[in-house]
Amino acid sequence: MSHIVIVGAGQAGSSLAAKLRDDGFDGDITLIGDETAPPYQRPPLSKDYLLGKMPRDRLFLRADSFYTDRRIVLRTGTPVTRIDPAARTLTFGDEVLSYDQLALTTGSVPRRLPAAIGGDLAGLFTVRTLADIDALEPQVRPGRRVLIIGGGYIGLEAAAVAAKQGLEVTLVELADRILQRVAAPETSDFFRALHSAHGVDIREGVGLSRLIGDGQVAQAELSDGTTLDIDFAIVGAGILPDTALAETAGIACDNGIATDTHGRTSAEGIWAAGDCASFPHGSARLRLESVPNAIDMAECVALNMLGGDREYVPEPWFWSDQYDVKLQIAGLNTGYDRVVIREGEGSRSHWYYAGDRLLAVDAMNDPRAFMVAKRLLAAGKSPDAAAVADASIDLKTLMR
Amino acid sequence: MAKITYIEHNGTEHVVDVANGMTVMEGARDNGIPGIEADCGGACACSTCHVYVAPDWVEKLPEKQDMEEDMLDFAYEPDPARSRLTCQIKVTDALDGLVVQMPEKQI
Ligand SMILES: Cc1cc2nc3c(=O)[nH]c(=O)nc-3n(C[C@H](O)[C@H](O)[C@H](O)COP(=O)(O)OP(=O)(O)OC[C@H]3O[C@@H](n4cnc5c(N)ncnc54)[C@H](O)[C@@H]3O)c2cc1C
Ligand code: FES
């Protein structure tokens, strides 16, 4: 009887376990996570859950019975501290467990501020886990002053929730514009205007010099010389792949746990998937931080662990909710040289091209543009840019 | 609470009680019923929670919002009348007896 162990009980880990059973694996499955909660969805954490619109029990990806019914042994609150790839064992607490194959789905960890600039003060919050949000939520009360450090999707979603709840919100972004790493200036402009309209004070090209306070954060000194009085701060300065366990086991890492096209790591019998994994993509490596990637890569790896032979080819997409705007992104915009704008009634989409080739689309309240783009990208088709820009042309005709 | 019948594409029926306030998608998820994938977890962003509602239920459900309508248009083999995204349907007592059928596949 063979034993597959999965370390990291999040989106990828739970999808991987489920897929092993769906594909007929009859051996033992152990899914180990260090968080106390069973696998849950993170996206609502910075959206409806933080807003108080979604109760905790609706976050869970699967009911408890799902694991028992499928003979998946779920061990929560269990940090794995060591892997011995040669002996095929892993260690948690004083227990040692043997495996035949192992999957690492350890996710990411948020960047933290160094203690030298006040990173160890009380009143600083990250937005990654349920425990993070449960600590943060009581702070989100009308009239309070929050500084959000970082203008990526997580920072902006947190800003939207805080603004909605009547807080005084300042957001600083060190780069010259919000969303710089992930989107075109046109998309940054759209979200800047949206947040400004909701009273968020966005300061771009401005970094945090240090946080000041006597135990509890009270002020923030910014790189432009200004000082803000604040009640608390949210650090949304990006995430790093959680490679800690892999590194100590001598597994090759390169911007994440390095896998081959099939999800194998450098250690025999050990695989990786989700946020923590970087995989070959064209001539480089790619690491994606999204739910669809966690699910799709985990399912691909499950298949390969059972003897399959499938390359992981991502079809990236993502979404973000801010105020009454739903952003849906299809594709990856890396390497674009122009952005074609399509404006509808109450909707808008930004189409990224490299020459005549469509790379990606940011769709704001425009699910049709998103769905059409997703299909086109999957089929390797690029619609004529002039037709895209002409809102009188039905998007569906572009699919022909 | 509502008793909801989920019929898989292969004909397998699952009859379960779903609490008020949950969505029809969550009813399937929490009871381990296959055929509704719900990749986005109910954000109306993926269309992988698509079902066909039994004909006599079409009129009884709350109307579709534009967002749902647009997403459905691109789901797998949508039916203009019967297709719904289950994550957009909140369960109430009025849904007692609802029957939904899963498509052959989710996109
Ligand atoms: C607030 C927030 C909002 C988001 N919104 C969106 C969105 O709108 N759309 C989208 O597509 N994506 C979104 N994401 C990203 C998405 O949630 C992640 O990409 C996804 O959760 C990755 O899944 P994963 O399984 O790889 O990692 P995770 O879900 O992070 O799971 C990894 C788990 O492994 C555990 N672990 C790590 N090391 C060990 C160890 N040594 N022993 C035991 N357990 C360990 C971790 O604690 C964690 O529980 C959001 C993320 C956050 C935080
Ligand atoms: S769960 Fe994604 S649209 Fe319903």
Image (tube, coloured by chain):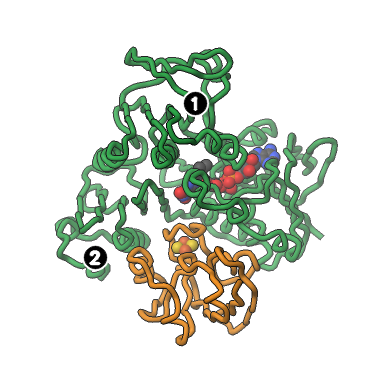
Chain colours: A green, B orange
> Image check: A350 left or right of A72?
left
Q: Is residue A205 above or below residue A101?
A: above
Number of other residues with Cα within 10 Å of mark 2, as a class: few under 14, some 14 to 19, many 20 or more = some
Quadrant where the image shows the C terminus of chain A: bottom left
Residue lying furthest bottom in this view?
B56
Q: Which circle's residue, 1 or 2, is located before the other in the chain?
A: 1
Q: Residue at x 40, y 42 (%)?
A: A164
Callout 1: CB less than 8 Å from ligand 1: no
> Image check: B12 left or right of A375?
right
What subunit carries mark 1? A
- The kind of residue on which mark 2 rests is Leu
Mark 1 or mark 2: which is in front?
1
Q: Position of residue A50 (x, y in %)?
A: 51, 43
Q: For residue A154, what is the image quadrant? A: top left
User: Which residue was labeled with disc 2?
Assistant: A395
Q: CA distance from mark 1 to mark 2?
A: 45 Å
Callout 2: CB less than 8 Å from ligand 2: no
Number of other residues with Cα within 10 Å of mark 1, as a class: few under 14, some 14 to 19, many 20 or more = many
Q: Secondary structure at mark 2?
A: helix
Residue A178 shows in this picture: yes
Do discs 1 and 2 belong to a common subunit? Answer: yes
Residue toward you, A175 or A373: A175
- The kind of residue on which mark 1 rests is Phe
> Image check: B45 left or right of A248?
left
Which labelled disc corresponds to residue A232?
A: 1
Q: Position of residue A166 (x, y in %)?
A: 40, 37
Q: Position of residue A87 (x, y in %)?
A: 80, 41
Residue toward you, A349 or A382: A349
Is there a contact, CB below 8 Å, between mark 1 and mark 2?
Answer: no
What subunit carries mark 2? A
Quadrant where the image shows the N terminus of chain A: bottom right
Q: Residue at x 43, y 65 (%)?
A: B47
